[in-house]
Image: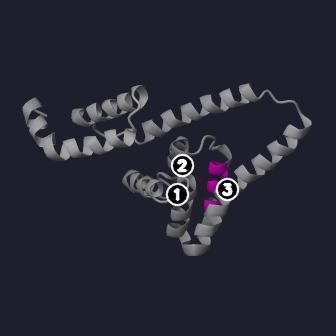
Amino acid sequence: MEALQVILTFLKIGLISFGGGWSTVGIIRHEVVPRWLGDEEFRSLIAIAQSTPGPIALNAATMIGWSRGGILMAALATLSVIAAPILLIVGAALLAKRASIDQGALDESLRTTSLGMMIMTLWALRPVSLDPLYALYAVAAFAIGAFTKINVLWAILGAGAFNALAGPWVRSLLGI
């Protein structure tokens, strides 16, 4: 019975997860917390899924399947999360040959929906309590990524190095 729940859950995630990557994290969280994972376990799952090669949803499905029933369940969850997108792509390709589709409107609607899903992901992964210094790092990383040509990876690494070297001193100076 649990195998069917895992299959149906990841079929649904695959079906409604437009945009891929981080836009799917909020949907995955909604489906697996608290059914199979707690909040902290979910955060760990996303960290591992992000750091391993491949899409987050695919890696998360595989890991949850593995934890729920070993290799067979991992394979079923993995196949379930990719089944709907593959069928949708084939269906859309067949439909596109027969119908006239406004590609610009379609792209815009998918981008807008993906933005909403990414905001949902940010909300789902927000810290329980936000250290003001960490908020400053987040704002700085956003500003660097959005308004400069500097790769945001350098901002992330810089924030980590700064926090390791000067974080305690800055916290004591600011009284936080």
Residue with the mark numbered 1 = 60
Does 86 lie within the magenta span?
no
Say what amino acid the circle numbered 3 marks: Ile
Say what amino acid the circle numbered 1 marks: Ala
Q: Which of marks 1 and 3 is nearer the N terminus?
A: 1
Q: In which quarter of the image is residue 96?
A: top right
* Distance (Cα) linking label 1 and label 3: 12 Å
Task: Tell me where the magenta segment starts and ends, as one range.
Answer: 6-14
Q: Which mark is residue 82?
A: 3
| Camera-side residue of 34 and 140 | 140
Q: Can residue 131 be seen in this view?
A: no
Q: Which of marks 2 and 3 is in front?
A: 3
Does 7 lie within the magenta span?
yes
Residue 121 x %, y %: 48, 40
* Distance (Cα) linking label 1 and label 2: 8 Å
Within 10 Å of the Cα at label 1, are there few (<14), some (14-19), or many (20+) other Cα atoms? many
Residue with the mark numbered 2 = 28
Mark 1 and mark 2 in contact? Answer it, CB < 8 Å.
yes
Residue 132 x %, y %: 23, 32
Left or right: where does residue 163 sit relative to residue 142?
A: left
Q: Earlier in the sequence, mark 2 or mark 3?
A: 2
Mark 1 and mark 3 in contact? Answer it, CB < 8 Å.
no
Residue 104 x %, y %: 72, 26
Instruction: Give the color scheme: rainbow, by chain, secondary structure or one colour.
Output: one colour
Residue 134 x %, y %: 26, 37
